[in-house]
Amino acid sequence: MPNRRQVLAVGGAGVAGLIGPSLVLAGPVAEIGMQGTSRGEHVWFTPVGLAVAAGTTLRFVNLDPGNSHTSTCYHPTLFDRPQRIPTGAAPWDSDFLLPGDSFEVLLTVPGVYDFYCLPHEHAGMVGRIVVGRPGDEGWHGAATDASDLPAVALDGFPSVEAILQTGRVMPPGQP
Amino acid sequence: MFLNLSAATLGIALMLAVPGLAHAESVPEDAPPPAPYAKVSELVPLPDFLPGLGTLFVDPATLPAGPFLGYDRDGKLAATIFMTPIEDLQGGTSYNDLAVGSNEVSSVDIYYNAGHPGVDKPHAHVVLFHGADAKSRVAE
């Protein structure tokens, strides 16, 4: 049973705080796994792209028995990175999750959220969540500021269209 | 003249030429190794036991290359591991005269690793196994 390390509400008022799990888990919950090969040659989020409704709680779970991972969104307040989440949504950083640990975040602002694993961005371990659909009130599309992102990270984001078409995009080579 | 070296003299010459041989004699077979070695999981956020490598100890001053000493679940030395960033190797960095945990090396595995806390850059793992059963002792 994974440990729930932290629950972070990411709402529209730009306020992030710790709130009770019972409140967060009242809505739908979706899971994104953090995985890697046994020797650590490859690491990835699975799915790498996911479409959810506003108000969904995302649960990140470290399923990799031999490595630590983070779920960290791109935001200037976190390691001075470019903003790649909707304006008005509060940023999140799970900190390092050991094997079996998990972290939850509630997403309420419609738009595109890009995130990465802190020690593995240069290995292409990134992901994208689409909350709602284009045209929803307050929708923010995919960020265009590539800034300091390595090419391998930029190449790792599925297109918004692909995510919306299938609901979830698996990483290359994963069923 | 070289052919007339006594066995003792040759031994001393080898120890001077290969510092790792001398170092190996100071590493205990049972965990934990003495300071300056420290448990990797207490230095960085990694699990205590890493499948394939064991419970790792390292002298932080030797990062990133190590040596890392890998102990099995019974606390017996199983492997010496070196971690050499690919980017550094490409840039001309070489890692010479690295110490080993034991003079007995039964096999060596070399493979790519995408990075982890402590050695964030993509790097090579060079794993020296100490004993025929060492790999299986740290497999899981």
Image (cartoon, coloured by chain):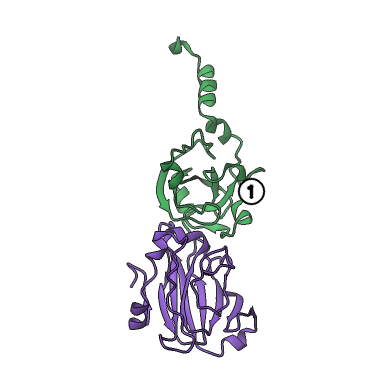
**Nearer to us in this view, B56 or A74:** A74
Quadrant position of the C terminus of chain A in the picture: bottom left
Q: Which residue is located at x 41 percent, y 46 percent?
A: B109
Left or right relative to A14: residue A122: left
Q: Which residue is located at x 54 percent, y 18 percent?
A: B8
Q: Which residue is located at x 48 percent, y 72 percent?
A: A84
Q: Where is residue A82 in the image (x, y as percent from the top left)?
A: 51, 66
**Nearer to us in this view, A104 or A87:** A87
Give the green chain's letter: B
With respect to residue A107, does A152 lie above or below? above
Quadrant position of the N terminus of chain A in the picture: bottom right
Q: Find disc 1 in the rendering and name its residue.
A: B38
Q: Chain A is drawn in which colour?
A: purple
Q: Which residue is located at x 61 percent, y 42 percent?
A: B61
The amino acid at mark 1 is Ala
Q: Can residue A116 be seen in this view?
A: yes
**Nearer to us in this view, A119 or A35:** A119
With respect to residue A14, does B56 lie above or below? above
Q: Position of residue A168 (x, y in %)?
A: 38, 79
Quarter holding residue A152:
bottom left
